Image (cartoon, rainbow, N blue to C red):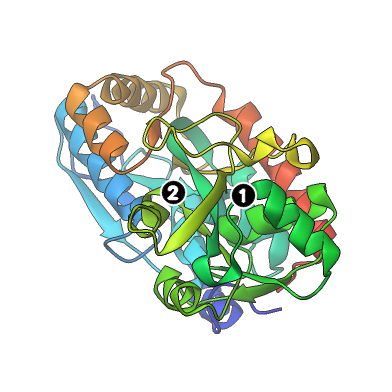
Amino acid sequence: MRCVHGAWAAALSTFLAVGLTPTVYAQGDAYPNRPITVVVAYPPGGSTDLTGRAVADQLSRKLGATVIVENVGGAGGAIGAQKVSRAAPDGYTILLGANNEIAINKLISPAVKYSYKDFTPIGLVASQPMVLVASTASGIKTVDEFVKAVKAKPGKYSYGSSGVGTALHLSGEMVKQQAGLFMTHIPYRGVGPLTTDLYGGNVDFGVFVLSSGLPHIRSGKVVALGITEKKRSAVAPDIAPLADHALLKDMDIGVWFALMAPPNLPDAIAARLRTALAESLQAPEFRKKLEENGSTVAPVKFDLGRYLADESAKYQKIVEFAMIKE
């Protein structure tokens, strides 16, 4: 199956062919003593970019340095992540990444040569649930109705996501796996075309990141069936978790954003970045900006290394179940 973008593997192969030779800089007496680049592995405007810019603004304040955002899109986030994994371990190039490029891409494409282990984890920044929705044309309004309808007519129904191998796709497959359902997955090139087909009843169900789905839910154009995380969202407490249904009790998957640095980052620099991030997570203006976008800001004390290992194992099971491969 093709992943995320039609030229996914080709784009990454071209990037790898060019190669990156890390440049080693003198650390000097203090870090930081020159501008820091936060790489966001997608074009401007999306939730990862918004989070990355909020983080960059706070790091600039906490570190007393210029922090710029560089958007390095392509290959489902893999090109930007690859760039950081091969950057000099000096703290001047770091990644604000999400599930796809940090933990999922490696599981579905042999073209991806790095894994989450090829970074120095700095900290979790924020997360938000996804939401399963139904088209109004389907006539389905509850999770129970959804499960019963799909079970009664295996293969009749379809659901859409923003692309093969994305966190949204994996969440849909997790629903199928846990409830024993058979639906056809329809990948779209972004949420725009998916929204159009949901409005027109051309696809029965869809998966959105909560912040992207809420405007359509609130307008009544689609029906919210449930969020993908076990806890209710403070942004939409009226939408119950899918896990409230007996067949989906283990449903717990979300979109998350983490700050990662190149491998072999010196302990002193890693500690400086972690302290700056911890201070940022407690800044009221930072919390407000992310919460307004539907995110839950991460706790200050959090074992990101263990979390990444657990998330990767979760994704591996879903990828194997759905046989998702590039």
- C-alpha distance separating marks 2 and 1: 17 Å
Q: Residue at x 49, y 78 (%)?
A: 197
Residue 68 percent location from the top left of the image: 20, 49
User: Where residue 145 appears, x then y in whole percent?
Assistant: 69, 53
Q: What number is the disc on residue 142?
A: 1
Q: Residue at x 44, y 20 (%)?
A: 299
Sequence-first tag of 2 and 1: 1
Q: Residue at x 59, y 37 (%)?
A: 241
Q: Name the quadrant of the C terminus.
A: bottom right
Could one spot residue 33 in this view of the protein? no
- In the rendered structure, which amino acid carries the disc numbered 1? Thr
Q: Which residue is mark 2?
A: 210
Give the secondary structure at mark 1. loop
Q: Residues within 10 Å of mark 2 (few under 14, many from 20)?
A: many
Closest to the observer, 324 or 32:
324
Q: Outermost residue, front direction?
A: 139
Q: Nearer the viewer, residue 63 or 225?
A: 225
